[in-house]
Image: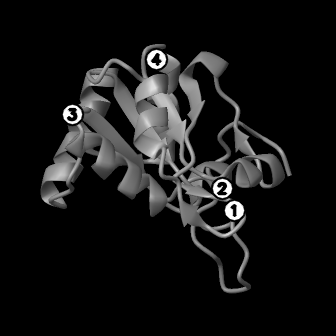
Amino acid sequence: MSTDQTLQTARQRGQEQALPYAGAVTPQEAYALLQNDSKILLVDVRTNAERDWVGRVNISEAQHLAVQWSLYPGGTPNPDFLAQLQASVPDKTNVILFLCRSGVRSRHGAKLATENGYANCFDILQGFEGDKDEQGHRKTTGGWCHQGLPWLGA
């Protein structure tokens, strides 16, 4: 599927689900988009601790940005999220794929960015680790890792 077709599918999902941002992509679609278009950016909104201790996507460093939605320890909201995003992505027309652990904080990040003029914000469904399985473990039922996409770390 071409970049344009993938983004069209993601936008259609967004319309069907009445998302407050451009749309949503599967982890596989996100990876294909990143591979096919070097201008597309992935913004990982997890904490620095999560990226260090759990792992992170293994993609081009030029496409991989980290802007924490909440801070570790304590999980308090990052009061500088928007300013840090704007410093990292000054072009508000860029396609931005937001990623978190399981797809909650990334939706918040995509929504806030959209509300502040970013036109092409997409949530990566299922996040990096996906939901917990019956035993309470992640990385087994969905998400970037479970799909066998490249990642580094624990």
Q: Label 1 is placed on what type of residue?
A: Lys
Q: Where is residue 123 in the image (x, y as percent from the top left)?
A: 38, 48
Tell me the distance, in whole angstroms, between the alpha carbons under discs 1 and 3. Answer: 33 Å
Q: How crowded is mark 4: few (under 14 residues within 10 Å), some or many (20 or more)?
A: few
Tell me the distance, in whole angstroms, between the alpha carbons under discs 2 and 4. Answer: 21 Å
- Regarding residue 144, the answer to whether it shows in the image is yes
Among all residues in the image, which is located at the extreme bottom?
134
Q: Label 4 is placed on what type of residue?
A: Asn
Q: Which mark is residue 139?
A: 1
Task: Of the two numbered discs 2 and 1 on the same chain, state the one appearing first in sequence.
Answer: 1
Q: Residues within 10 Å of mark 1 (few under 14, many from 20)?
A: many
The residue that appears at 61% across and 50% down in the rendered structure is 147
The residue that appears at 13% across and 52% down in the rendered structure is 15
Q: What element carries label 3?
A: loop
Task: Of the two numbered discs 2 and 4 on the same chain, state the one appearing first in sequence.
Answer: 4
Q: Which mark is residue 117?
A: 3
Quadrant in which the N terminus is drawn: top left
Mark 2–mark 1 CB contact (< 8 Å): yes
